[in-house]
Image: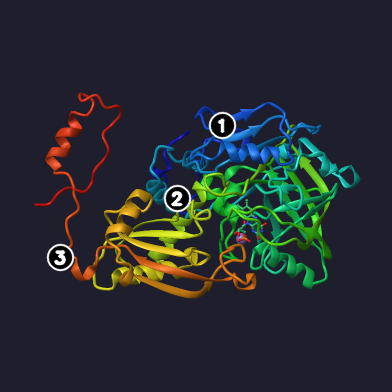
Amino acid sequence: MEEQSVERPVGPVTSNESVAVAWRDLREWIALIETNGLLKRIDQPVDADEELAAIAYLATRREGAPALLFETIAGDRSGSRILANMLGSSKERYALAVGLDPTLSIAEMIAATRDLMQRRIKPVLIAKKDARINDVVLRGDEVDLTQFPAPKFWPGDGGRYIGTGDITLTRNPDTGRINVGCYRQMLHGPRRVGLYCSPGKHGLIDREAWWSRGKPCEVVAAYGIDPVLFMLAAQVFGIKESELDVAGGLTGRGVELTEAEYVSLPIPANAELVIEGLLHPGDTEQEGPLGEFTGYYGRERAPQPVIDVKAVHHRRSPILTAALMAKYPSCEIGAYYAIMRSARILDDLDRIGVSGVVGAYAHPAAASGWGLVVVSMQQQYAGHAAQVLALTAQCPAAAYYTKWVIVVDEDVDPTDFNDVLWALSTRCHPAEDLDILRNTWSTGLDPSQYPPELRPYGSKVLINACKSHKHIKQFPQATLLRQSTYEHAAARWSELGFEGPPPKMTAFHKE
Ligand SMILES: Cc1cc2nc3c(=O)[nH]c(=O)nc-3n(C[C@H](O)[C@H](O)[C@H](O)COP(=O)(O)O)c2cc1C
Ligand SMILES: [Mn+2]
């Protein structure tokens, strides 16, 4: 790793090699995580039909489990490998993807991520002959995607999914802007791939814009992709923002693209497996269901558009990225998502201009960070905690899904659930401190409401777990160490026979 990017410059960067991450493609990043002890290779043959996902699930039932590189897929003749749990619950792998020091705390990573996500660097177009993705290029009838291993994850899945840890590029016909989204892709046949975009997603907006002109929608999808493009494809940005420019900002160098064979869209030059194709108006096939990040099967089987694949590019022995959707800590959407969502919630609160906000965390165990947000704050005036609760609940980055919004005082670390549960148990008086918002923005994937048609209408509970402001002067002092005693004990730490440094303390007893 080159450096800690907490020290990186913030804002638009033009000449940036000096602040770029140490890797250039998925393979170099895999080498980096392997050097850091964060990769496990599995060379025994493993069946892509449920067995691979079962092993990935069992291997990830603990936090921080390594990424899994399945090197031999039973029956596969394409020489493909499959990377699962690429990021998962590991904050260290997130850090190594964006060039941060992996030993930073989650709160420090959230702060550094806020800086990194402000940078924008445009993609660069490289010559076809220099693009690693062009090791093998196949067109028309030469294309047979069924030769690649596409996992079936859960017993109730409706098919084999070649695209989960993927990215999809579409272009808007009005603005020319290229969108990058992560949408699941079920394999229907040698040159047919289902593409499911839910309402409001930019891929769907682009597709409808082409179809309303009576024209097919061009699509490029990559099924083996570096972690930063994967992460950003699953983040919500404005319809005018470019995920490609944000990816460049996060890695410190422009994303390398190259010309495609058939479509006018560019293709990612350093991906592992890329398809080009067209979505024709009205061409659909039955798609789904797929086990989801909620830990349940999502939408029922239904007709969805199909990509008519025109060309395939791949590296030799491509490494396909497969994203297992499951309960935490087995879900691919884990540590990185919690960090990025928390960073964006803090950005929103900053933009609104409310004072006293210290930290935020959307814990990944709460349905990949969607279900719950904790904000820590310094109470400065009567009603301040209620204001932060309400603003958090409906700010753009937190409004979707989130059911539990909790505020805690600044001495409580929102990333530490031992601390948060302490605050909930000692500072929150439910009869006084709970409010409910109804008919809020939610998703059909949340199974808690009946009938299912009502699921997009969510509800939220706002929980004030700060010390009661009305009684803040009488509120008992928490048991804290005397600073001089702490410093004395800390100085003797190794002499007393303890390993490593003593725990850091920031708050001390006041006389
Ligand atoms: C592994 C994974 C699978 C996803 N599958 C889908 C999907 O099938 N359909 C969908 O609409 N969104 C899916 N998402 C969520 C989108 O990627 C996310 O909403 C993103 O913002 C979409 O990009 P857009 O905002 O440019 O439309 C998935 C996310 C991840 C991480
Ligand atoms: Mn988008």
Q: Which residue is mark 2?
A: 113
User: Residue at (17%, 44%) from the top-left corner?
Assistant: 481
Q: Residue furthest right?
A: 141
| Of the pair 156 and 159, the residue shown nearer to us | 156
Q: Could you say which quadrant of the image residue 380 lies in?
A: bottom left
User: Residue at (65%, 54%) from the top-left corner?
Assistant: 182
For the residue carrying disc 1, how many other residues have a C-alpha within 10 Å: few (<14), some (14-19), or many (20+)?
Answer: many
For the residue carrying disc 3, how many other residues have a C-alpha within 10 Å: few (<14), some (14-19), or many (20+)?
Answer: few
Q: Could you say which quadrant of the image residue 100 lies in?
A: top left
For the residue carrying disc 2, how many other residues have a C-alpha within 10 Å: few (<14), some (14-19), or many (20+)?
Answer: many
Estimate the spatial distance between the alpha carbons at disc 2 and disc 3, rounded to whole Å.
36 Å
Name the residue type under label 3.
Lys
Q: Is residue 17 left or right of residue 53?
A: left
Q: Which residue is mark 1?
A: 39
Q: Is residue 301 left or right of residue 25?
A: right
Q: Position of residue 423 (x, y in %)?
A: 30, 57
Q: Secondary structure at mark 2?
A: helix
User: Residue at (69%, 43%) from the top-left corner?
Assistant: 269
Q: Position of residue 261 (x, y in %)?
A: 81, 48
Q: Secondary structure at mark 3?
A: loop
| Residue 101 visible in this rendered orientation of the protein | yes
Q: Which residue is mark 3?
A: 473
Q: Secondary structure at mark 1?
A: strand
| Of the pair 278 and 126, the residue shown nearer to us | 278
Q: How many marks?
A: 3
